[in-house]
Amino acid sequence: MTTIEIIIALTIHFIIPLAGLIYFLRLRKQMKKENLENAPIIELFIIFVTYGGVILVVLTGLFWYWSGIASLGTFYLILGAPIVMGVIAYHNRHTKRISKYHKWTHILGVVYAVIVPVITIMLFLIRDKLWH
């Protein structure tokens, strides 16, 4: 394995997930500091995991070797995540006026249904141009 491959692997599989986790923990700390009523902590964690999964699948598809784990992640993102994100959006439709966190939880739940098909199409188009 070359140095550049090690850097790519560490970035995709360690640095990006770690950055997402740190940002989520900071966001959770901020919500606790603001003493929010019914803070959407669990919903935001699921959103972070789901959108982080999208980022990891895209980066894996563009810069790394496809694997069984990448296929399982893609399977979840295509079949499971739209349902989960729809439930989150539906659950937060009445709470979106409580705080900016509730509002963004609702928005990110709704937008997932648009973002993933667009990213998927772009990934196939870009990948074909990069590798052919």
Image (cartoon, rainbow, N blue to C red):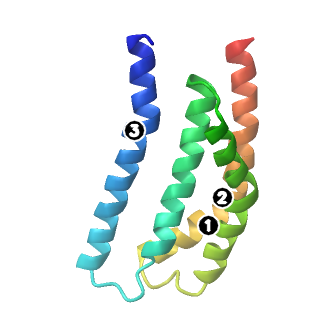
The residue tagged 1 is 109
Q: CA distance from mark 3 to mark 2?
A: 24 Å
33 is higher (above) or lower (below) than 21: below
Helix, strand or loop for disc 2:
helix
Where is residue 57 shown, x and y percent of the image? 60, 39
Query: Mark 2 = which residue?
Result: 112
Please, what is the three-letter code of the amino acid marked with disc 2? Tyr
- Residue 69 place in picture, x, y as percent: 62, 41
Amino acid beneath label 1: Gly
Residue at 23% from the left image edge and 77% from the top image edge: 33
Say which residue label 3 marks: 14
Q: Position of residue 119 (x, y in %)?
A: 68, 41
Dots 1, 2 in contact, CB < 8 A? yes
- In-image side of 121 versus 73 (left or right): right
Earlier in the chain: of badge 1 and badge 3, it is 3
Residue at 32% in and 62% down = 25
Seen from the viewer's position, the closer of residues 65 and 118 is 65
Residue 22 percent location from the top left of the image: 31, 54
Answer above or below: position of 10 versus 98.
above
Find residue 118 and report its image quarter.
top right
Outermost residue, left side: 33
Which numbered circle lies on residue 11? none
Which part of the image, by quadrant, shows the N terminus? top left
